[in-house]
Image (cartoon, rainbow, N blue to C red):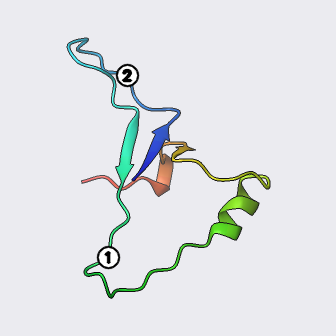
Amino acid sequence: MILLKKSNSLPNFGGKRLNNRHETLIIATKNKNSKFTFNYKTGKFINGGKQMGSVWTFLVCSGNERIKD
């Protein structure tokens, strides 16, 4: 499981609960025989040569990138 930290999330204006500043990413396969690819070297390269951790920081999408219902 990986936590995606939202560094620019919207505040909770109601003040009755915690601010949702993360999304949970679960990596899974359909069954034990399924194959998946995890590009560890690419992730390490993108992270400045450092080992990737379980908390990734991303900005919340805005503008045309954001999907709205």
Judging from the image, what secondary structure is the residue with disc 2 in? loop
Query: Mark 1 = which residue?
Result: 29
Q: Label 1: few (<14), some or many (≥20) within 10 Å?
A: few
Say if 62 sits above or below 38 in the image.
above
Measured from the top left, where is residue 36 in percent x and y? 45, 80
- The one nearer the camera, 68 or 20, is 20
Judging from the image, what secondary structure is the residue with disc 1 in? loop
Q: Disc 1 and disc 2: Cα gap in Å?
A: 34 Å
User: Which kind of residue does numbered mark 1 sit on?
Assistant: Thr
Q: Is residue 44 left or right of residue 55?
A: right
Specify the quadrant that holds the C terminus.
bottom left
Quadrant position of residue 14: top left
Query: Mark 2 = which residue?
Result: 11
Residue at 33% from the left image edge and 24% from the top image edge: 19
User: Which kind of residue does numbered mark 2 sit on?
Assistant: Pro
- The one nearer the camera, 36 or 5, is 36
Say if 32 sits above or below 68 in the image.
below
Measured from the top left, where is residue 41 in percent x and y? 70, 69
Measured from the top left, where is residue 56 in percent x and y? 54, 46
Measured from the top left, where is residue 51 in percent x and y? 69, 53
Residue at 51% from the left image edge and 47% from the top image edge: 54
Direction front: furthest residue: 32
- The one nearer the camera, 42 or 13, is 42
Count of numbered circles on the image: 2
Q: Is residue 51 left or right of residue 58?
A: right
- The one nearer the camera, 40 or 56, is 40
Q: Is residue 51 left or right of residue 31?
A: right
Of label 1 and label 2, which has the lower sequence position? 2
